[in-house]
Amino acid sequence: MSDHVRRAASADARGPIARSPIAPAPPVAAVAGWEVSARRSDADLTVTDLTPLAKVQVKAPWDGALAGTLGGPFGRAERSASFEDAEGDDEDVLVVGSGPGEWLALGSPGTAPDLVERLERLAARLPNPEFVTVVDLTHGRALIRIAGERTPDLLAKVCGIDLGETVTPNGAAFRSSVARLAVDVVRYDRDGTRSYLLHCERSSGQYLFDALLDAGGEFGAEIDGFVEPGLS
Amino acid sequence: MILLPCPWCGPRNVAEFGYVGEAGPRPDPASAGPEEWRGYLYGRANPCGWVAESWYHRMGCRRYISVERHTLSNEVRPLATEGAGR
Amino acid sequence: MPTRPRPRRYPARYSAFSLLRHGLAGDHLVPAWRDRELKNSYDVVIIGGGVHGLATAYYLAANHGITDVAVLDKGYVGSGGSGRNTAILRSNYLTPEGVRFYDRSVRLYERLAADLNYNVMFSQRGHLTLAHNDSSLRTMRWRAEVNKLEGVDSEVVGPAEIKKLVPYLDVSAAVRYPILGALYHPPGGIIRHDAVVWGYARGASGYGVHIHQNTEVTGIDVAGGPNGRRVRGVRTDRGDIAASTVINCTAGWSTLVAEMAGVRLPIQTFPLQAAVTEPVRPFLDAVVVSGSLHVYVSQTDRGELVFGASVDPFAGYSMRGSLEFVEGLAGHVLELMPSLAKVRLLRQWAGLCDMTPDFSPIMGRTPVDGFLVDVGWGTYGFKAGPVSGEAMADCVATGRTPDIIAPFGVERFAEGRLLGEKGAAAVGH
Amino acid sequence: MSMRLGPQPGEVLDRTRPFTFTWNGREVPAYQGDTIASALAAAGVRVFSRSLKYHRPRGLLTASFHDPGCIVQVDDEPNVRGAHRLARPGMRVRSQNTWPSLNFDVKAINQLAGRFLSAGFYYKTFIRPRWLWPTYERVLRRFANGGEVPPEAAGDYYDKRYAHPEVLVAGGGPAGMAAALAAADAGASVLLVEEEHQLGGHLCWGDEADLAALRGLSERVAAAPGIEVLCDSAVLGRYEGNWIAVVQRTVPGVAERLVKVRAGTLVVASGLIERPYVFAGNDIPGVMLSTAVRRLINLYAVKPGERAVVLTGNGDGDAAVADLKRAGVTVAHIADARLGDDIVRAHGRGRLRSVELPDGRRVDCDLLVTATGWTAPAALLTMAGDRPVYDPRAARYFPDPARLPEDVLAAGGIAGDGSLDELLAHADAVGAEAARRATGAGDGPVPIPTLPVDAHPALFRGRTHGIVDFCEDVSSTDLVQAVEEGYRSVELVKRYTTVTMGPTQGKLEAVNAVAIVAEATGRSIGETGTTTWRPPYVPVTLGALAGRVFEPVRYSPMQPWHEAHGATPLVAGAWIRPDHYGDPHAEARTVRGDVGIIDVTPIGKLDLRGPDVPKLLNLLYVNKWSKLDVGRVRYGVMCADDGVVLDDGVTGHLGPDHYLMSTTSSGAATVWEWVENWLQTQHPDWQVHVTPLTTAYASMNVAGPRSRELLERVTEGVDLAGEAFPYMNVRTGRVCGVDDCVLWRIGFTGELSYELHIPAAYGLHVWETLMERGHDLGIAPFGVEAQRILRLEKGHLIVGQDTDGLTRGFSAGLDWAIKLDKDDFVGKPELAWQQEAGEYPRLVGLQPLDGSVVPEEACQIVDPPRRADRRPRIVGRVTSSRMSPILGRSICLAQVDAHLAAPGTQVTVRLPDGRHIPARVTDHLAHFDPTGDRLRV
């Protein structure tokens, strides 16, 4: 290691701040190294920036052994215990079947490296080797949650998918056009309250957030900050 | 808006897809002469009737899919595709 | 050179005076064109009774004295693209070949009312192609430079001048698609498209050309082997017709008709949609086109706003139109002119466009002797009606391909010599 | 004079809420529930507008949405349907198409010229002299109909939503309500759409029994779960896939909402529209349809006149007579068409004075009511493929169920006649069947009863000629004349006379027009056919169709910094990025002299993993990729199979089976799809996973002679020394405390430079840190404009600017990259033929001899003509040009014909002002540092 490298290492003591593409609504706080909004709202419909969550993509044969192990088949999101290996902790991980042979694992902020490692280990332990790749998308995507009974009405203003119980029950996952953006949508009810996770390419995060707030105006939508580190 | 039967996502609005069109095989570049090659580049059957064609599910599963479409009525029916199903 | 034929004989000459006489005397009117018996043989059979077919027939008769001509249409005259386009004329193309060709067309259009004794209402109110980014601004400059070299009036203008020409345009920088400049083309404008069709029909009929409506061509007779094929005539749902020259002047069905003669064309057919609003007080003089927003707007003398766009996103023959089209159209119109939000869309429709790989037509002779094509008109066929008719008539009468259409031969695709309109014509109305 | 009646049993007025609005500046009283037209009629107004061509006064005709006589301007909104739009306190209503006033109208002299303004008038006049046409046209445009559009937008809120009901019922009359109830009973979700402000259709203006039936139906609909009702809403069109557009006008805060419905089954229960009768004087104010007077009396408590003549051919006419009498109108004469009675003409100027009967008598009156039959508004059905069939016995068209697709049904009056009970029974069965078809539940098809068809006298045109199209002012003589002139098909008549082309879209006039053309051509109505119904069913605002503007925009993580530092934005596709911060020349000089930093986040980045990535790269790029060691990057060019240059960029080998491909910013999406296409359709067996990471990284290029010095201060884990990390290499490491950063040593600007790809959430942190740590080195940000200058100095091409849609590889100066000895790659055959042919245009460097002149980009390079009368021939064009701050002269790239491509060749550039200037082809594409010494330090 040359001198300058060492110098740089010692110079940087305070950790860098991670930022979502969505400008945090004041007051601003820091959670797990991320700058987030600490605003609280008890409105009937809330919009929350969940971008700090760990977001890891897995690609593997859609009909292979890993697919069976991961849970969350294409079109479904599951909090799957089966994916947790022996060393795994009680980490809060949601596995979304986001495409044919494509999964998205969502976890608490800062857990992405660990999640990548665990997923790679899972793949390595398959009886017959499969072509599996794991990519950390935490920085490449934005994640937004909308919650409240009228969320289907909000979403119906920006998305053409049938949000009825028959087509998209709790746990349904699909990718479609939302406000003319390709977005992964996961229906993820919380304590019986309708809730959706929306996952899009990072640079359009602010655009999508604004579009959801605009569509939600009719239902009194408000920003609810990100204060809990997990999904629930 | 017509619906395309995506073998992965189910029926979806055509606006989610990119049109690729009639899919002809690519000639062997080692042996193809100009006429054959340019037939592949520019030639289309352009039937007024059923045609097998490809679409890219840009807003969905991002798979290239094949369907049969009637170019006058825009009726669509699925074509057997690799890995169809979920 | 064939001799100049006898002067045409109109059934009745149109003028304010003749109208006045009719108004006072209440005498019966004379048909603009005659219904004739279908003969079993013609010198020339033209398939397609739109502006191309009728202009070809008219110029065959008027310029070359060839009058034993039948124009066949499966519907009524002008029922295809000629009656479905948005009636915009211009010659500000990108390639010298294109500019020359369309310049000739505009010049023929300028004197068409007088030539045909039929007011086609050509209104040269100026044509603006907006540029919203520097790459399209560069293309506008490119077109302007080529236009000027070919003697066509075009220049790149800035937002201030654009605002002066079209006060309703939002030229502020604070919009999603700011207007950086435009190609301004003063000779461009709009015309009454149906009148062009009817004027040519009346003119051709006056020379003795037969116009057969509701006559569908079901086959083309071709004699000879693979090396020496020659056209013999056509079959129709009303009987067979012998002809040594058959011209395919169809749009939307050009590949199907060509295939009847065993000729394959590198064409794909796409629907093209258009729409019109209820009339509002005239406020828009120039024709406004935005390539990036895929929209063009003009206002008729009746006050209606006429909108068009680029072809549909996928190929086909459906003319039912789509909701997506009017949704996108409205969004883009309001991006340009936000104050039109309360103007109501009255009607939408669709036509068919035969798209070639290089956004240029296919004209002239084919591998089948006597079978000529005037096809592949994409979204710019109506503009080319007169010049195409004149050139195709020349081609038939002289047996030589006129220089002005020489670049448009079908062989260019197999030879890999595509024309360069592609960049400019994606939405070039 | 007030025409307001006392309270009526079915009236929709709230008499406890009176207010006023203005009509042409005059205050008019109204009640909540009044339409503009009903309030005006109650106030005694009889003339609402002037007709299009002859400027004849027009009054109420149908008193419904489709009334052509009372289209008005409301505030800044043109063409408002006055007989439908509810009056609101304070609204300013003006008549349209009148100058200088409604009652005195100079344009009415057109009426005198009416005999000459016949069909095709314009086609036959103003032909010569040609130069006068623009003057004529200016006058014509002054006469155009319609309201005024303001130049500035009002900023109303429009939006859209999607809906997925199993059954959509179009029409909320009794049949529509019954169908909706039956469908809901069968378990279907139902959307019931009604054009009027309340459900009930004709029951609303019916008698006590009708009102009782309406109450029963309304209560059941309100109680039924699964029925969503949209009143004051219209079904605009039925498109492929039962995709149905509805405009909803009742959402608070929303001017209009477009509801886009994917319906399982569409039930069309639109009822019937009453048809006007064609006779002389049929457009005089005071001539109304039977439904108009019934609506005025029963819904709005307006007395439509004092003394009436009624022409009736059916029960509705009879009911109108009863209503008139009840309202205190003297019914002076009843002509019963079923008995052969008729009327000949109406007399009056500005208002009806009398009606002439066949026996020559003239009956004085101020109201003439006609009940002459019905038109089936079959628009939605014809959009679904139906071709209505004419039944001469009933004198109207009926849908042809055999032509309807499975997912469309017709219910109620549009399908046949019968008592209310019969119509309800029909609709009930249709509703149940619609639910079955949509949900698949139930045991087999529901039998649908056949409705009776009542005989009706054929009443289209009477003994005289009159107006057929009230919007367009087209008379029956115009139609006859068009036929005489050879325009014999209905479509040609329509185009020639403009009949049915106006705002009522043929709903009132189409059948009359067909009947008159049939009469004139000697054909039957059935043979003559009808004109095409095209969407929308009713005119709809552009605002509603546009809805909210969903135009995704993209920002880099450093956008807040750019905004705070005065960057001038550049819109590049969806991206908003800095064009420049200050003087672009100064920015460029900083890069050449010290160190600059540019945000290049929009550069496309594809993560490629798997053992077969080298195969993929070899296939897609024209150059060779089999030997690219880990830690190396290479520039590559992609062509399509026609040999035309598609994109370029560098790809780095990050680790085992792991590559990062970069693309142009504008090509990022296209290249991703391109890669997927070749993998999925041609080589599904290859093991390659593609993940777009464009914005997973904040990308910034640190460029300039002092860039290494800066990076050495902030980088850990990477030896930046020239020999350890040479040009065209890639490393990963820690930058400004951020792990997993990718560093490429490449040089678009031609300087020593490092492209940093930082995990995006830390992009702003790293950028700010670099600005801070580089302060003493003279660091400054540079924008896209400075980068364009720098790259042009270096002779780097931009795909899409220095190439175009026809530029094949060898024309882009890529001879060195194209490896025709590879077995295959995309575009190879065309490139081989291009090279063989030889005579292709070349990309060259070009410098005007006068270095102070910068020819604009796209200036043409010409072969000056030898003779003055010839035009110059185009032999090339300038594709890029700038003033170079470092060289102090203008520099260009240009496409030129092959014979001009040799270095040193002098060519002629034509400037936009027409001047010709000489320029010289340079030795290299690079104008600056052609040997690349500065890159490799």
Image (cartoon, coloured by chain):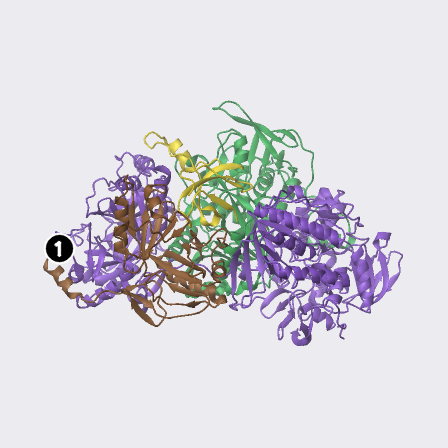
Chain colours: A brown, B yellow, C green, D purple
Residue in front for this viewpoint, D924 or A201: A201
Q: Is residue C49 left or right of residue D781?
A: right
Residue D840 x %, y %: 32, 40
Q: Is residue D279 left or right of residue C116?
A: right
Residue in front for this viewpoint, C227 or D825: D825
Residue in front for this viewpoint, A28 or C27: A28
Chain bearing tag 1 is D
Q: Quadrant of residue B24?
A: top left
Residue C243 visible in the shown view:
no
Residue at 39% x, 31% y: name it. Answer: B36
Residue C399 x %, y %: 52, 32
> Considering the numbered disc 1 on the image, is that residue within a helix, a strand or a loop?
loop
Q: Quadrant of the N terminus of chain D?
A: bottom right
Q: Quadrant of residue C419?
A: top left
Residue at which label 1 appears: D721
Residue C154 x %, y %: 45, 55
Image: C279 above or below D497: below
Residue at 17% x, 54% y: name it. Answer: D934
* Amino acid residing under circle 1: Ala
Residue D773 x %, y %: 19, 66
